[in-house]
Image: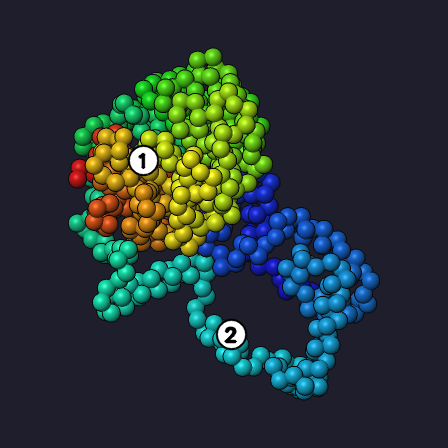
Amino acid sequence: MTTPLTSSELNLVVFRYLQESGFTHSAFVLGYEAGIHKSPIDGNSVPPGALITFVQRGLQFLEMEANLNISDADEDFSFLQPLDLITKDVNQLQDIIKEKKKYLRRDNNGKDKEFEVEHVKDNGQTRENVKMKGKEAKEKEIEREKPHEGPLDREIMDQDDKENIQHEDAISGGPEPMDIVDPPTSQSIEIPAAHVTVLEGHTSEVCACAWSPTASLLASGSGDSTARIWTIPRGASETDGPLNVVVLRHTKGKANGKSKDVTTLDWNGEGTLLATGSYDGHARIWENNGELRSTLSKHKGPIFSLKWNKKGDYLLTGSCDRTAIVWDVRAGEWKQQFEFHTGPCLDVDWRSNLSFATSSTDRMVHVCKVGETRPIKSFAGHQGEVNCVKWDPTGSLLASCSDDYTAKIWSLKQDKYLHDLKEHTKEIYTIRWSPTGPGTSNPNKPLLLASASFDSTVKLWNAEHGTLLHSFTGHGDPIYSVAFSPNGEYLASGSLDKSVHIWSVKEGKIVKTYSHNGAIFEVSWNKEGDKIAACYANDTVCVLDLRM
């Protein structure tokens, strides 16, 4: 038979199929649980439609097998690799078998010295043992002597390698100017348990969290088909009794619960209304007391991004159905649907009360305006899915990040990007602008952009020049979320390594850290800047009281 398809290869092929078919949520869950981001396999080597091609090739494979002598079938197919079945047709596969048979015959005649055939007597019968010789054989022997190395081990080894490189740099005169060598985590920077409130009640992973902009209310959204609004006491984290919490149920009973996963949420500017987006394709608007105000139904696929405009009269949603919709909140109905993308819409962000940006798996970024039937600007340049788009605080610059390992900064004044930020070595999942620079409440500080990647680093960029200021390397796994403090002096990051780090933007080092039992999907600062909420895969939300 063919060389077996490994579980890692199969996971990657199924993952790609889910992505290509628009099943973004399912792809995310599989990618997280199977550790796709840790796979040593180059995803670019898997062609589009690989899973379907495998099935089609399987039928041709069976047809070939039927046309071969049964006694030769196993031997013949042992010459084929799994990827051969994707990329070659029947005639090419037959040519491969013939060529390798010919090679093996030359090999057995002693003309090829890459292999040695040993004949061993065993119970009167002759067996052939084929041994690899030369460098490749030595490498395989070394690998056999090593302990079994899984994807997690590779990540740990990669981290050790980085630490060794940093140590060597220190011996030779110090690291490069832009590299941040983190001090070891010590008790002095660990946030004590007494300063942490663990919010329990969700029964599935908590995907999103957001603080009210006007009150001490924290909203969380979960895979258990509920959102919750928690009343968080001001000041110290210790509480004498249970916290007040309102449960926003997105389904009645237990039927079809999974299809109503809460994937995203956002408060309006006044903090009076909370919008939630769900896997069932509906957006819902809730009063801050938990009363359902309206259900917005038009999308034909899961909603993965949703934002209020500053005025609070429009809500913007982006869906896997490849569209973005602007909703008239007062009327409780859709105002305009934008159908410009050819793939699922992954993110949306308002520029003003009427114009906004969208990003998609189709590698495009569109800038649209309510009332216009075509995009007012389209940006092409990314070579992979565009995961996130964010306008700077003044709406002058647009940042985007992609699976192509780059982030880009765009201006409406030109078609090509202003800056191409290329220092990451894996997919960039999210980006955030600092609340600093002209036109903000911190006008004397420079405008910065933070990018978080599956390469386990956060990078800080100067927006004006497009230069790398700091590379934060304290995490050991992919980073899904970053958030600036309201004064722009600190940056929080949450990772699959179960830790939240708070970095000093000025000093470029960790000043506080906290670890809990679960991967982190989102971090969020409150408006005062003295608390951070982090939502976890272990069904909890943690509120960290910083009191820096």
* Residue at image coords 57%, 47%: 16
Q: Is residue 190 visible?
A: no
Q: Residue furthest front?
A: 413
Q: Position of residue 380 (x, y in %)?
A: 51, 41
Q: Position of residue 240 (x, y in %)?
A: 20, 28
* Residue at image coords 28%, 60%: 176
* Residue at image coords 45%, 64%: 149
Numbered circle sitting on residue 140: 2
> Is disc 2 placed on a helix, strand or loop?
helix
Mark 1 surroundings within 10 Å by alpha-carbon count, few (fewer than 14), some (14 through 19), many (20 or more):
many
User: In front: mark 1 or mark 2?
Assistant: 1
Amino acid type, label 1 = Ser
Mark 2 surroundings within 10 Å by alpha-carbon count, few (fewer than 14), some (14 through 19), many (20 or more):
few
Q: Which residue is mark 1?
A: 524
Q: Quadrant of residue 174?
A: bottom left
Q: Tell me, what colour scheme is on the image?
A: rainbow
Residue 306 lies, with reference to residue 523, above or below; the image says above
* Residue at image coords 41%, 28%: 350
**Residue at mark 1 to residue at mark 2: CA–CA distance:** 47 Å
- Quadrant placement of the C terminus: top left
